[in-house]
Image (cartoon, rainbow, N blue to C red):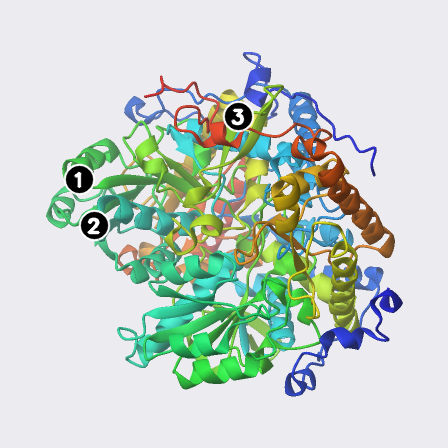
């Protein structure tokens, strides 16, 4: 691990490989007569696209792939992202014309297979989160949040309450998407502080709740990896105030078979399929973010829903109280298909084991890393779930080595860094989620790397601050990247900077 | 591990969960099965689907059959790309970052715009984001759209607009030519208009010849001009930039992505200049250098627009996007190049016109319903046959053909009609088969 060296090809932009007239395509010879188009409709200026061969394209992108780190290479402990290993059979299952070449507007009779799969998957997801009904339409977690908050909006609108209820409460430890989604759905965001246990401060919550409260958005376990043990009381207070409870499912991995958000009192849940249910993250997407709701909110789900009549499945758009559509079609079907196969293969016991192992791994790692000099585990008496947050504040004060430096040094050891500077309530935060798909050996290697970097901070801080050196490129000039005078977002020559 | 943690059982880690919750946590799900059983079971279910390889399909309308080169599938299968995530640590994620920078460059070129983001979910959500962006920039709250936009896209637009208090108004299109009605546009556009949106080619396959003029009118009134496109047309037809658009959006699925029953898709989003850029939703990748100047390098930029920094003040809540689909599009456009895309455009144009020509000669059909230049998609009117479009499609399916989208529910004024899609995937024989089947069905009455 200490001998890691990532490939560095110094690969030019693909446009720089262009040779005029080179082609990477083969099109069938024309079989139909040529049609002439009025010249004023035609494109005047040819787009500056690469002119390269298929060999050039493959070599270019394979070289680039070697300058990229994925979960197939090793531990990827980005907190709250659940970067687990994805079983390879799922890749095979989706690589068939029986899903790839299905058109979304086909007659229901010709897509019974995929409709049955999606229907059963939505039933399973409802069972897993303990709610009544699921929509598979959202394409990502944040998209699910938007749909969920729109459902809150529709609920209060129906009660004639919407003008009055214009606030959504989020804890100060919440994912950034929560306040962003609430604002996007037209609500004001009220932040509630955490208490000395790293959980929602009940007294502060009581103070924030009012007739203006539309709802509360919460993830449980929270972003510190701590279970909000007062959740039943929180739910009671929010409901008493007339609000709804929204569950951010980013941290669902720790709860599989252990606790259902519906039983905690949540009314709406989004599920990050790409985190919890074994589908790859694709370098940033596609994901999938289904939402589940309680019975009283079912009528507001996006259209269409997938329905079953005997052994026939169909799409139903006749739902007058629906929030409408939030995606052009039915959601990210091929991602959902992977999740269906994942749940089938894992079974109920396998899923529970996912929660147990992910929590065991996190607690084991928290104990080991909490012993590294300069690092602290805030709220040390609390048991963690799937993730934990370390603070490098002491190290930063004593050595000048920050969480950012430390994370860059980890890259030199061929492991991905944790999420850093989040949640905002922990100074110099390092947020670590090992997942269930790493072995004890890997956890020990990770600990070794962390300890080495931590020790270096005290003995040779320069080497940590100057890292990484083993990655495709060394430390990047971020300021230059975003500066108006030097920012470059395409390969086009920039007009003279203003 | 348990011993080192001083506990006997993993249950110890779940003791803080209240009893009433824990007691009701068992999952009523099937037991585990092997990898082989899983594969057999799923494949068995999937075999009940009729794919567009099993039948000849003429469905389009937002998701279209296009050939995906093997090289594209190979590139997106590279597990270093597939199993990575958002490049929060750029030094170890240069591959995806460079690929996305190249994607942004190619989309900007194709659209004739200055900047493009690194993807949104799909065309429909890109439209919703475009309306909200136009409203933020102009401080106005009305948005104009043409009549012939697919209902699913309009419904999504309205869901995005409602909480931002943006009102969506429709502008009529000429029933004979499809052109946007000039006097109706003049009448509806005002100092409240944030944006004017058109699609080119339109949902019904005809080109809008007056795009430039519509853009000029929007600009005169201080509104933004937004054009939605099918990017596969852009090797041949005028780009949104050439027509004067401020924001260009579209569906990137035709660029190397499979239809996948409607998702994942790829939302294209581009804008004209730096002033607009600051309000653009979605992730942006920039090219820079390393601090020691030893190498070029790529990283995420202008993150202060995004949710993880700006929280409730962000331009959008989007986090996970469609990066892998964007990678497919970059690989696809690299393979095609400017020449390939132009030639592909001509093949699609010729094939779709051949189909129109053949159907036009069938007694009782009106093909197309609009007198205008068409590309890839076209309407077929069945009113004079006395048969419902759904009935004709049912008959076609018996013959191994999936007819076009029935338009009557969406646009009742078009009568019994369908929207048909013909691409490079359709051989002349496929088209002849379609025409012959329709003749037979009409003759059999």
Tell me the residue that label 3 is attached to.
Answer: B288
- Asked whether the beta carbons under mark 2 and mark 1 sit within 8 Å of each other, the answer is yes
Tell me the residue that label 2 is attached to.
Answer: B140
Asked which secondary structure carries label 1, the reply is loop
Residue with the most extreme front position: A398
* Co-location on one chain, circles 2 and 1: yes
- Asked whether the beta carbons under mark 2 and mark 3 sit within 8 Å of each other, the answer is no
Horizontal side, residue A288 vs residue B352: left or right: right
Q: Position of residue B232 (x, y in %)?
A: 46, 34
Residue B199 quadrant:
top left
Residue B170 position (above or below residue A144): above
The C terminus of chain B, quarter of image: bottom left
Evaluate whether residue A343 shows in this view.
yes
Horizontal side, residue A401 vs residue A75: left or right: left
Kindly identify which chain the residue marked by label 3 belongs to: B
Asked which secondary structure carries label 3, the reply is strand
Circle 1 crowding by C-alpha within 10 Å: few under 14, some 14–19, many from 20: some
Of A306 and B16, the residue lying toward us: B16
Residue A4 position (above or below residue B131): above
Number of the label disc, if any, that sits on residue B222: 1
Q: Position of residue A135 (x, y in %)?
A: 52, 68
Residue at 40% x, 20% y: name it: A494
* Mark 2 or mark 1: whose residue is earlier in sequence: 2
* Numbered disc in front, either 1 or 3: 3
Residue B272 position (above or below residue A210): above
């Amino acid at each position: 691990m200490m001998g890691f060296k990532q490939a560095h090809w110094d690969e030019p932009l693909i446009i720089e490989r262009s040779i005029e007239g080179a082609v990477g395509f083969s099109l069938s010879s024309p079989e139909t007569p040529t049609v002439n188009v009025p010249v004023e409709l035609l494109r005047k200026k040819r787009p500056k696209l690469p002119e390269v061969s298929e060999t050039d394209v493959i070599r270019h992108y394979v070289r680039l792939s070697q300058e990229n780190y994925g979960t197939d290479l090793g531990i990827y402990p980005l907190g709250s992202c659940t970067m687990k290993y994805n079983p390879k059979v799922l890749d095979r299952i989706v690589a068939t014309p029986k899903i790839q070449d299905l058109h979304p507007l086909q007659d229901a009779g010709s897509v019974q297979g995929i409709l049955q799969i999606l229907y059963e998957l939505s039933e399973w997801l409802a069972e897993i989160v303990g709610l009544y009904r699921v929509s598979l339409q959202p394409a990502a977690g944040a998209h699910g949040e938007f749909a969920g908050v729109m459902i809150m909006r529709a609920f209060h609108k129906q009660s004639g309450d919407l003008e009055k209820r214009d606030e959504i409460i989020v804890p100060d430890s919440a994912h950034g998407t929560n306040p962003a989604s609430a604002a996007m759905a037209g609500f004001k965001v009220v932040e509630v502080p955490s208490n000395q246990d790293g959980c929602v401060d009940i007294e502060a919550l009581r103070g924030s709740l009012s007739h203006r409260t539309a709802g509360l958005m919460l993830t449980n376990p929270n972003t510190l990896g701590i279970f909000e043990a007062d959740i039943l009381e929180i739910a009671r207070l929010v409901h008493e105030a007339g609000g709804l409870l929204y569950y951010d499912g980013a941290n669902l991995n720790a709860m599989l078979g252990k606790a259902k958000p519906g039983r905690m009192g949540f009314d709406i849940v989004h599920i990050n399929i790409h985190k919890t249910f074994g589908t790859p993250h694709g370098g940033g997407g596609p994901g999938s973010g289904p939402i589940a709701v309680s019975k009283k909110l079912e009528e507001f789900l996006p259209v269409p829903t997938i329905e079953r009549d005997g052994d026939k499945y169909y799409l139903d758009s006749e739902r007058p109280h629906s929030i409408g559509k939030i995606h052009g079609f039915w959601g990210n079907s091929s991602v959902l298909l992977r999740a269906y196969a994942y749940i089938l293969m894992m079974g109920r016991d396998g899923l529970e084991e996912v929660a147990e192992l992910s929590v065991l791994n996190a607690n084991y790692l928290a104990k080991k890393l909490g012993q590294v000099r300069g690092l602290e585990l805030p709220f040390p008496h609390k048991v963690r779930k799937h993730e934990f947050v370390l603070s490098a504040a002491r190290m930063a004060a004593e050595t000048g080595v920050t969480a950012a430096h430390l994370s860059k040094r980890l890259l030199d050891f061929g492991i991905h860094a944790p999420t850093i500077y989040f949640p905002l309530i922990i100074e110099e935060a390092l947020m670590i989620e090992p997942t269930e798909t790493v072995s004890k050996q890997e956890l020990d290697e990770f600990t070794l790397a962390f300890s080495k970097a931590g020790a270096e901070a005290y003995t040779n801080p320069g080497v940590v601050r100057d890292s990484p050196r083993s990655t495709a490129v060394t430390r990047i000039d971020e300021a230059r990247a975003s500066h108006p005078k030097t920012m470059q977002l395409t390969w086009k020559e920039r007009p003279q900077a203003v | 591990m348990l011993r080192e943690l001083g506990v006997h059982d993993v249950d110890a880690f779940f003791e803080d969960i209240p009893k009433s919750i824990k007691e009701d946590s068992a999952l009523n799900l099937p037991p585990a099965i092997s990898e082989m059983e899983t594969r057999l079971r799923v494949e068995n279910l999937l075999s009940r689907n009729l794919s567009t390889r099993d039948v000849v399909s003429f469905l389009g309308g937002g998701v279209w059959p296009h050939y995906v080169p093997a090289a594209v599938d190979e590139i997106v299968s590279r597990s270093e790309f597939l199993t990575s995530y958002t490049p929060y640590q750029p030094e170890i994620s240069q591959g995806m970052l460079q690929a996305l920078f190249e994607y942004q460059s190619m989309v900007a070129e194709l659209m004739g715009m200055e900047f493009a983001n690194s993807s949104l979910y799909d065309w429909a959500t890109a439209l919703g984001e475009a309306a909200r962006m136009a409203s933020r920039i102009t401080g106005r709250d009305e948005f104009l759209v043409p009549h012939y936009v697919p209902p699913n896209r309009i419904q999504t637009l309205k869901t995005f607009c409602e909480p931002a208090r943006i009102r969506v108004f429709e502008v009529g299109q000429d029933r004979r030519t499809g052109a946007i009605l000039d006097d109706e546009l003049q009448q509806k556009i005002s100092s409240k208009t944030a944006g004017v949106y058109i699609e080119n080619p339109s949902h019904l396959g005809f080109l809008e010849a007056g795009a430039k003029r519509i853009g000029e009118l929007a600009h005169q009134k201080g509104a933004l001009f937004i054009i939605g496109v099918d990017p596969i047309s852009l090797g041949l037809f005028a780009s949104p930039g050439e027509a004067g658009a401020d924001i260009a959006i579209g569906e990137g699925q035709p660029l190397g992505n499979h239809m996948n029953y409607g998702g994942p898709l790829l939302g294209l989003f581009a804008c004209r200049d730096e002033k607009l850029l600051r309000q653009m939703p979605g992730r942006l990748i920039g090219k820079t250098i390393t601090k020691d100047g030893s190498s070029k390098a790529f990283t995420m930029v202008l993150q202060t627009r995004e949710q993880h920094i700006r929280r409730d003040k962000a331009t959008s809540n989007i986090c996970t996007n469609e990066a892998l689909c964007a990678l497919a599009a970059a690989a696809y456009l690299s393979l095609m190049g400017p020449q390939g895309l132009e030639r592909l455009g001509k093949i699609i144009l010729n094939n779709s016109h051949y189909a129109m020509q053949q159907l036009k000669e069938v007694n009782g059909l009106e093909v197309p319903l609009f007198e205008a230049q068409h590309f890839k998609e076209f309407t077929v009117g069945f009113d004079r046959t006395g048969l419902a479009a759904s009935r004709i499609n049912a008959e076609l399916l018996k013959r191994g053909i999936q007819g076009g989208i029935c338009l009557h529910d969406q646009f009742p004024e078009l009568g019994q009609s369908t929207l048909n899609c013909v691409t490079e995937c359709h051989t002349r024989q496929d088209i002849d088969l379609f025409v012959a089947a329709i003749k037979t069905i009409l003759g059999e009455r």
